[in-house]
Amino acid sequence: VEHDSPVGDLLARLADSGPRRDPVAMYERAQGEAVPSYATSPAPSRRRPKAMPLVVAAACVLAIACAVVLLQSQPTGLDSGAEKPPSPGPTPPTVQVSLPPGCVLSAACDLPRSPVRVVLPWVPVGYLKAPFRDQLMSGRNGVVSSEIYYAAEPDVPSPSGPVARAIRVVLSDNRVPTGQLPGADWVDDHIGSHPARKDAGTGTADGQSANVSTLIVDLGPGGSLTFIGQGLPIDDLVKMAERAAVL
Amino acid sequence: VTPTDMPTTTEVTSGPEVALGDPVSARDFVRLYPRLRAFARVIVDADMDPNDLVHDALVAVLQTRSGQIENAEQYLRRTMLNRVRTLRRSAGNQRRHLRLVADGSNRAGEAPDYPSDVGALLEVLTPQERAVLYLLDVERMPVAEVASLIGDSAVAIRSRASRARRKMRRHLEEE
């Protein structure tokens, strides 16, 4: 059949070319493959999703902002406070003194809340040896976690100076973290190279005068702390304990 | 040659589209198959089997709920056209190019089963343009009906047909 246009003729020839199949067999096969669905229109071509309308986007932003405000207005619990403790400043935190002087020396102190976070301000942690620090960090002996925050201010005073080398922490089950003092190797690794340490300008890389740091110890349920001073003036240790804040 | 002249297993009915409220029955599909296959042959690329395209469209129809299709043939054709678009955009071109590189032919290990001048249609015109020209020039479908099937306006269909003819004419003159 001749068509009006050569293109029509070509299309007709193209349409007539190629193999054919048995439509009955095709239908039966398609029936086997068809899975009922709720499609209500011809299979759509894959197109890019339309851009989100501006109104919808603005509503989403507003909803997120409201959620953030609501969350921030909620009273922060113990755990939320523990997430981000305040960075130490020139003045040691004295939020709550819950460790009586008696427990500073040797007696175990039952902390009022569990779990609890104890902040020891101005502990010259440079004298804590690596295994001790590692145990704190690894959560053994009931310690959940610990963090050490460095004071960046160069003129922050250190209360006890080098005499604080004997600070140790004993946990409630009397398991004493191993590690002796001082820990120059740990100091080299953690404090001597720390930028804040250099800014402090009061010590050297061997940790002999590492200073102005805050040790935060998170105890597990029922945990308690005992502070044992060796070679540290008791008055200084008491002062330090009084500064300890149970958050 | 018209679709109704093509050899089929059953006699093909011409005239108005077959309106099927339910998903296509076997009897209806047998009747529609020659026209669907011819349409598929026009819109597919060289490396695609038009029967596969018909099969995919039929599966899509059978997956629809009963009573959702007003015009089964139009639904099948639109589904085929959409699928060709998708295939061309995704793996179709890549597969075809790989085959061309592999054996230098349009189909792996086989010579094209259409004349070379017909093959020019596949190179010059897009599937949509081929579909428009086929429906207008071969099936003699009204522009409004083609527009409904393609999912475009009548003006756009006329414009697309004119552009496609111009492209083909230019191509034939160059040859």
Image (spheres, rainbow, N blue to C red):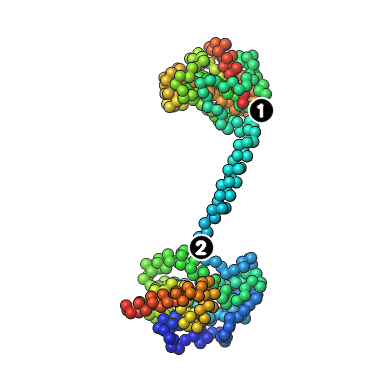
Name the quadrant containing residue A244: top right
Question: Given this view, does label 1 or label 2 mark the residue nearer the observer?
Answer: 2
Q: Identify which residue is drawn at 66% across, 73% down.
A: B67
**Looking at this view, is B128 or A227 the one in front?**
B128
In the image, are marks 1 and 2 on the same chain?
A: yes
Residue A217 appears left or right of B126: right
Q: Identify which residue is drawn at 58% across, 26% down.
A: A217
Please state the horizontal and vertical placement of residue A136, each as a whole percent of the image. Answer: 56, 27
Q: Identify which residue is drawn at 42% across, 71% down.
A: B108
Residue topped by disc 1: A114
Chain to which mark 1 belongs: A
Q: In which quarter of the image is the C terminus of chain B?
A: bottom left
Dot 2 falls on a residue whose secondary structure is loop
Numbered label attached to residue A47: 2
Numbered label attached to residue B34: none
Classed neighbour count for the residue bearing mark 2: other residues with Cα under 10 Å, few (<14), some (14–19), many (≥20) = few
Residue B119 appears left or right of B155: left
Q: Identify which residue is drawn at 40% across, 67% down.
A: B97
Vertical order, A113 against A72 (above or below): above
Q: Residue flagged by tag 2: what amino acid is it?
A: Arg
